[in-house]
Image (tube, rainbow, N blue to C red):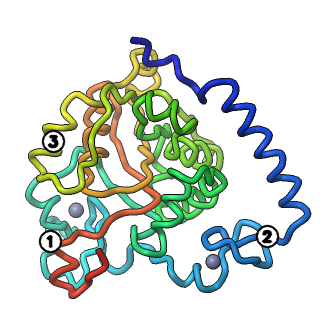
Amino acid sequence: MRLSAPGEGPALRRLAAGVRRAAGFVLDSLLPPLCLSCRVPVLAAGAQCPDCARGLNPPGGFLCHRCGVPLGGGLLAERVEGRLLCPGCHAAPPDYGQARAALLYDEGAKPLILALKHGRRTDLARWLARRMAAAAPDLLARAEAVVPVPLHWRRLLARGYNQSGLMAAHLARAAGLPLLPRALRRLRATPPLGARSAAERARVLEGVFAVAPRAVPRIAGRRVLLVDDVLTSGATASACARALLSAGAAGVDVLAAARVPDPRIEALDGGGRA
Ligand SMILES: [Zn+2]
Ligand SMILES: [Zn+2]
C-alpha cells in the first residue's frame, strides 16, 4: 500500500474544482460579497454579517494552561506552580505543550467548520487561519515548523483536500514558517471518538499516527505547531504529538480552529452549550 500516492485527488476532480473556482471568481467580482456563514450580502468580502459575527465566541475567561479549555468559574481548576489546569490535564498531562483554539465549537462556529470540512468551502480556511493566528501569537512565535493533523488517504481522496492542511498552509505562509504538510501520516482510518472514554480513545488511536521517514530530518530538534480543525478530547492531538516527539521534535503545541468546552466544567457552570 502506497500511503504517499494520493495528493489532491484524481485529475477530473481537480479540473472540476478549478472550473468551479474560476466561475466562483467571476461571479464574486460581479455580485455583492456574501456573509461567510449565512450568505446574506455584506459590505466587504471575507466578512460576516453582524448577526453571525455576534454568534462567534472565542474561548474566554481563564483557560487551562495546557489544553486551553475555558475553566468557567474555575471551580474545578487546580493551580500548579502558579498555573491553572483543568481536571483532565491535572490527572494526565497531554503529550503536547499547549493547545489553543480560535473559537468555541458552538452553534456559531459549527456551521463554518462543517462547511469547510464537508461543504467544499475551502475559502473559509484562510479566514479561520487568521483568527487562529490572532488567538495564539505566542504559540506561533515559538514554532519552527507547521504540521497539519492528517486525514486517512482514503478520506483525503474522497474530499480532495485536508481542511487542517489548508489552514496550516495559510498559517505557515502568514508566519513565514516551514510547512510540512505530509510529515504526519494517518496509518488507519479511525471511528468518531466522541462518546468513548479516555482509555478507549487511547486504544483506538494506538499506532494510528507516524512521522513519514522522509520528514524526520525536518522534524528532529524543531518545535512543531500542530494544526487541527476541532479539538475535542485532545486525544488525537496527543497521539500526533507522541508521534512527532518520538521522531525527535523538540516540542509540540496545538492550534485548532475550534474547541469543544469541557462538559464537566460546563455542567458546573450552568453552561448547557453542548
Ligand atoms: Zn451571516
Ligand atoms: Zn486542560
Residue with the mark numbered 3? 202
| Residue holding disc 2 | 33
Up-down relation of residue 233 to residue 215 (above or below): below
Left or right of residue 37, residue 268 in this image: left
Apparent side of residue 41 relative to residue 208 in the rendered image (left or right): right
Q: Is residue 197 above or below residue 177?
A: below
Q: Which residue is at a point 11% across and 53% down the rendered structure image? A: 197
Mark in the foreground, 2 or 3: 2
Judge by depth and name the residue closer to the eye, 212 or 230.
230
| Depth check, front residue: 8 or 165 | 8
Amino acid type at image mark 3: Ala
- The kind of secondary structure element at disc 1 is strand
Q: Amino acid at mark 1?
A: Arg
Q: Nearer the viewer, mark 1 or mark 2?
A: 2
State the quadrant of the C terminus.
bottom left
How far apart are the alpha carbons under marks 1 and 2?
A: 47 Å
Residue 79 — which label? Answer: 1
Q: Find numbered disc 2 in the image and state the secondary structure of the residue it sits on.
A: loop
N-terminal-most mark, 1 or 3: 1
